[in-house]
Amino acid sequence: MAYDLTRLGQWASLPFFGDHWPGIQRHLAAETRTILPSEEKRFVALEQLQPKDTRVVILGQDPYPTPGHANGLAFSVTSNVALPRSLRNIFREMDDDLGAVPKTGDLTHWAAQGVLLLNTSLSVPAGNAGAHARLGWAHLTRDVLNAVSRHDCAFLLWGKHAQSFRPAIHEGKHLIIETAHPSPLSARRGFFGSRPYSRVNAWLQTRGEPPIDWVKLPN
């Protein structure tokens, strides 16, 4: 069954869905391998947050290739899953920055507050990280950044891969934080000590917007 684009709201009008999605969809349908995340979770990041409501963008690469981990949001895992190494480093920096971290790796509460957790590839064969990196998903990433950056927004570009998409961001009064990726191989090269969470919140508050509760939703 074809994915129902009406679930995406305004995102459905992006050029990607007319120009590139049909070919990707055919490729995915022909795959004999298990593809992650499951089809109903593939566009969760866009389903949960419309362009006008996006206040912060965090770019990941591709979904976790371990079955049961990916939940459709970049860097996020289902609540019963042990933290992957990059997410452990994300939380370590948060603890240093804010003095607290979420109880689980499920970052759905970030999305509920306007944080778009977007992978630059929305599919991956189980156990084969990066295998769909050249499938055409990058066109969607550029379209999303183009749409979101028509209003001022905070962008966390962690690592050279995410930073390669900066040309898709319109000029504006954005907050753009570029650091090393939080992976174990690079976190010590500039991710640790970057304090992105407090910097984003300070920027939002100067604009008269409520800060992101990175740790948990208010009671």
Image (cartoon, rainbow, N blue to C red):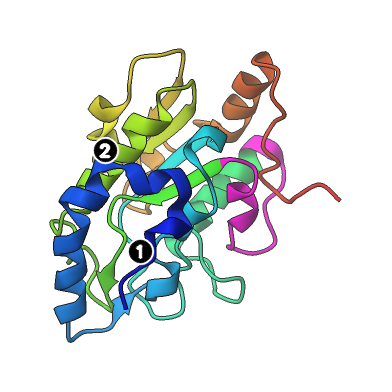
Q: Which residue is under mark 2?
A: 142
* Residue 21, horizontal then vertical, whole percent: 22, 57
* Residue 37, horizontal then vertical, whole percent: 38, 72
Amino acid on which disc 1 is placed: Pro
Q: Is residue 47 visible?
A: yes
**Depth check, front residue: 24 or 191:** 24
Q: Which residue is under mark 1?
A: 63
How far apart are the two marked residues, 1 and 2, measured between alpha carbons? 18 Å
Q: Is residue 74 visible?
A: no
Query: Which of the 4 image quarters holds residue 27?
Result: bottom left
At a point 43% along the width and 57% down the height, the residue shown is 6
What secondary structure is marked by label 1? loop
Q: Earlier in the sequence, mark 1 or mark 2?
A: 1
Amino acid on which disc 2 is placed: Arg
Extent of the magenta region: 97-114
The prevailing secondary structure element of the residues shown in magenta is: loop
Callout 1 crowding tier (Cα within 10 Å): few <14, some 14–19, many ≥20: many
**Depth check, front residue: 129 or 184:** 129
